[in-house]
């Protein structure tokens, strides 16, 4: 998930702390400021700061959110999926959804 800046990551780290959500703090990952955390179902998620990086334009934050607009989640970033058998999932992602396989 993408946010605009490192300041947004710091804001989210404080919010995660306030709600008792496990996280690693703001770290550098693949050259980008990131905030890895684990959701209530055990999914590993990462907030990533755009910090001016070019790419797919971010979305418009929800106007009724309690999250200040400058800290809002703007969209998705990279996705990694861990599966026991690659072939069935790869078939759906490439043949049905239209993704392009670049590794694995």
Image: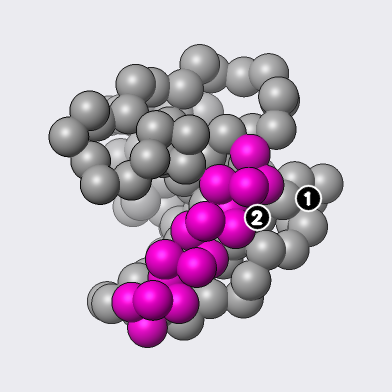
Q: Which mark is residue 16?
A: none
Decide whether residue 49 is among the magenta residues. no
Residue under the point 42% across and 70% down:
16
How far apart, in angstroms, are the residues tagged by discs 2 and 1? 9 Å
Q: Give residue 60's position: percent from left, percent from top.
A: 34, 21
Residue under the point 53% across and 18% down:
56
Quarter-of-image position of residue 65? top left
Identify the residue under disc 2: 34
Q: Give residue 46's position: percent from left, percent from top.
A: 53, 57
In this rendered view, identify the residue nearer to me: 35 or 99. 35
Tag 2 and tag 1, C-beta contact below 8 Å? yes
Q: Relative to residue 85, is residue 30 drawn left or right?
A: right
Q: Give residue 85's position: percent from left, percent from top.
A: 42, 65
In this rendered view, identify the residue nearer to me: 39 or 4. 4
Residue under the point 33% across and 45% down:
67
Q: In this view, does 63 lie above or below 93?
A: above
Chief secondary structure of the magenta span? helix
- Residues in magenta? 5-20
**Alpha-carbon neighbours of circle 2 within 10 Å: few (<14), some, or many (≥20)?**
many
Identify the residue under disc 1: 30
């Amino acid at each position: 998930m993408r946010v605009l800046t490192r300041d947004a990551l710091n804001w989210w780290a404080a919010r995660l702390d306030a709600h008792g959500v496990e996280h690693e703090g703001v770290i550098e990952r693949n050259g980008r400021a990131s905030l890895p955390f684990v959701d209530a179902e055990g999914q590993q998620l990462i907030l990533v700061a755009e910090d001016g990086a070019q790419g797919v334009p971010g979305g418009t934050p929800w106007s009724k959110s309690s999250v200040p607009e400058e800290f809002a989640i703007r969209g998705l970033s990279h996705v990694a999926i861990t599966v026991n058998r690659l072939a069935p999932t790869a078939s759906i992602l490439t043949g049905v959804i239209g993704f392009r396989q670049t590794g694995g």
